[in-house]
């Protein structure tokens, strides 16, 4: 199957604090690309959140 490559587009400070340690939260914009036989099949832009103190990846819950 195709390989997925991710590259960081940008990083900026996000609002809020880490629920585990209270550290600052950073939002990272990531562009991911899946290719099959060298042809781009799927392009996605994602935003990932992580703590700067404990380096834990944070998950956004929508309700």
Image: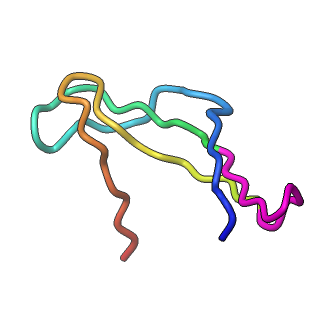
**Toward which corner of the image does residue 3 lie, by quadrant?**
bottom right
| 28 magenta-colored | no
Vertical position of residue 9 compared to residue 37: above or below: above
On screen, residue 37 above or below 28: below
- The image quadrant that residue 6 belongs to is top right
31 or 34: nearer the eye?
34
**Residue 39 placement, left or right of 21:** right
Q: Which residues are magenta?
A: 31-42
Q: Is residue 8 left or right of residue 35?
A: left
Where does the image place residue 60, in percent across and percent down from the top left? 37, 59
Q: Please state which of residues 11 and 34 is positioned toward the viewer in this rendering.
A: 34
Q: Which of 55/63 is in front?
A: 55
Quarter of the image holding residue 20?
top left
**Does 37 lie within the magenta span?**
yes
The furthest residue to the right: 39
For the point 89% across and 60% down, which residue is it? 39
| Residue 47 as seen in the image, left or right of residue 40 | left
């Amino acid at each position: 199957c195709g390989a997925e490559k991710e590259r960081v587009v940008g990083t900026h400070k996000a609002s809020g604090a880490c629920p585990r340690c209270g550290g600052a939260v950073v939002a990272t914009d990531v562009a991911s690309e899946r290719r099959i036989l060298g042809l781009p099949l799927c392009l996605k832009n994602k935003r990932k959140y992580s703590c700067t103190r404990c380096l834990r990846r944070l998950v956004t819950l929508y309700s």
